């Protein structure tokens, strides 16, 4: 569409104004009267030629609207930075579209997320890595070999997003290798009070004392058709003696802030880190805090943002504890240790002794427990062949 100007003329001698426009050869169109004003349209190149007729007839002419690509392009003339920026943005988008923007794990236990992501990063699955250089089959095979805590790992690309799908090592998982032959052995010393064997043949008797490693049940069963091999399973309850010890210093050490914290900020872009502050010089003792402020789209973090690290210097402040305070702390630690060490064991009797010497409170607890001491132990069968 050619550039045109819609104008409004008012005041003066409007009929004479139109006559002079015709004399000057100004091609005006769409002329119409609207009250005391005159409306019309003229090509943009002829608009300046309307000044002389307007001046001689005392008419005031104003622009109502500008139309055409000529006016739209003119506003961008001289703004070379916009064109250069658009070209650079296109090149940058073309280059970065072939790289990994985010790595999202799936099926990884929380405590193993960091170690597994660090392992796959060494295999090339990292933010900023080229997608075309990923060898997904080799990564899966190497992950199974290097990572003992997984039995399957695959990397699936969804555009620029790398999804790391993991099947954790779980003996109950269908992909886990099944045990063909196993025995039940005792995990600790004790006196057997009951034995319920669901698979295999029971070897131990109720009332019999056993030591750690004693065979309780076997998967090798002799039948009328010969020897059969399989797994052994069951529960063998025994009365055991357990001892737990905890030590609590009579002095409590608190780490308190000492001085002003230091903050290190860096701008990250596809794995590249651009420092915005001087490197930190931490003391021997400090508290480290990290913060990440990433650009997100739809809840997905993009490889663009700021990383902050804050170091707060600390100093040790010693506070003496009374014997009652140390005893309360020792019992709290003992309760945590009971939960870990004894687990589901039934405690029949408990005897606690407390000794305070050398600035340390030592609490020793002796237990008589009823617990399951049976553990499944895989067995390998080796066949002897004659002539070898």
Image (cartoon, rainbow, N blue to C red):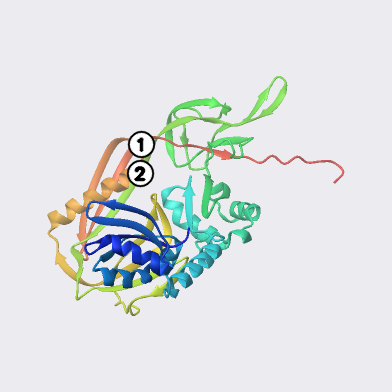
According to the picture, the residue beneath numbered tag 2 turns out to be 242
Q: Residue at x 34, y 37 (%)?
A: 369
Residue at disc 2, secondary structure:
strand
Q: Residue at x 43, y 72 (%)?
A: 77
Judge from the rendering whether residue 200 lies leftward or rightward of residue 254; answer left or right: right
**Marker disc for residue 283:** none
Residue 306 visible at all: no
Rendered view: 208 above or below 97 = above
Q: Nearer the viewer, residue 352 or 151?
A: 151
Q: Nearer the viewer, residue 45 or 219?
A: 45
Within 10 Å of the Cα at label 1, are there few (<14), some (14-19), or many (20+) other Cα atoms?
some
Residue 311 falls in image quadrant: bottom left
Q: Nearer the viewer, residue 240 or 317?
A: 317
Rendered view: 231 above or below 316 = above
Q: Residue at x 52, y 41 (%)?
A: 170
Judge from the rendering whether residue 309 lies leftward or rightward of residue 170; answer left or right: left
The picture places residue 386, in percent across and down from the top left corner, at 84, 41
Within 10 Å of the Cα at label 2, are there few (<14), some (14-19), or many (20+) other Cα atoms?
some
Q: Disc 1 and disc 2: Cα gap in Å?
A: 11 Å
**Marker disc for residue 345:** 1
Residue at disc 1, secondary structure:
loop
The picture places residue 379, in percent across and down from the top left corner, at 63, 40
How many numbered discs? 2
Q: Earlier in the sequence, mark 1 or mark 2?
A: 2
Tag 1–tag 2 contact (CB < 8 Å): yes
Residue 356 falls in image quadrant: bottom left
Judge from the rendering whether residue 308 lies leftward or rightward of residue 135; answer left or right: left
Q: Nearer the viewer, residue 356 or 162?
A: 162
The picture places residue 326, in percent across and down from the top left corner, at 17, 56
Rendered view: 208 above or below 156 = above
The picture places residue 280, in percent across and down from the top left corner, at 33, 77
Residue 244 visible at all: yes
């Amino acid at each position: 569409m050619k550039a045109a100007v819609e104008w409004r003329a008012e005041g003066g001698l409007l009929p004479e104004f139109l006559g002079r426009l015709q004399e000057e050869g100004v091609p005006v169109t769409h002329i119409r009267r609207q009250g005391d004003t005159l409306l019309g349209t003229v090509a943009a190149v002829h608009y300046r030629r309307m000044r002389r007729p307007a001046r001689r007839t005392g008419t005031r002419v104003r622009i109502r609207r500008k139309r055409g690509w000529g006016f739209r392009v003119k506003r961008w003339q001289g703004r070379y930075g916009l064109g250069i920026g658009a070209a650079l943005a296109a090149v940058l988008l073309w280059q970065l579209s072939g790289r990994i923007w985010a790595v999202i794990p799936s099926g990884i236990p929380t405590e193993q997320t960091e170690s597994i992501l660090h392992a796959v990063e060494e295999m090339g699955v990292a933010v900023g890595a080229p997608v075309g250089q990923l060898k997904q089959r080799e990564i899966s095979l190497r992950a199974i070999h290097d990572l003992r805590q997984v039995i399957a790992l695959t990397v699936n690309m969804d555009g620029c997003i790398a999804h790391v799908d993991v099947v954790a090592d779980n003996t109950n998982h269908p992909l886990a290798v099944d045990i063909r032959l196993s025995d039940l052995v005792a995990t600790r010393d004790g006196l057997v009070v009951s034995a319920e064997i669901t698979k295999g043949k029971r070897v131990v008797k109720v009332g019999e004392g056993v030591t750690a490693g004693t065979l309780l049940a076997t998967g090798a069963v002799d039948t009328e058709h010969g020897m059969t091999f399989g797994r052994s399973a069951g529960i063998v309850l025994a009365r055991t003696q357990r001892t737990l010890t905890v030590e609590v210093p009579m002095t409590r050490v608190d780490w308190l802030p000492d001085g002003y914290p230091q903050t290190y900020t860096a701008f990250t872009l596809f794995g590249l880190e651009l420092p915005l502050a001087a490197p930190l010089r931490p003391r021997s003792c400090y508290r480290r805090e990290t913060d990440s402020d990433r650009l997100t789209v739809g809840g997905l973090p993009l490889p663009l943002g700021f990383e902050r690290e804050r170091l707060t210097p600390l100093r040790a402040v010693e506070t003496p504890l009374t014997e009652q305070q140390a005893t309360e702390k020792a019992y709290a630690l003992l309760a945590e240790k009971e939960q870990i060490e004894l687990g589901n064991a039934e405690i029949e009797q408990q005897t606690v002794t407390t000794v305070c010497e050398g600035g340390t409170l030592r609490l020793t607890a002796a237990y008589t427990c009823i617990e399951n001491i049976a553990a499944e132990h895989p067995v390998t069968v080796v066949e002897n062949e004659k002539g070898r």
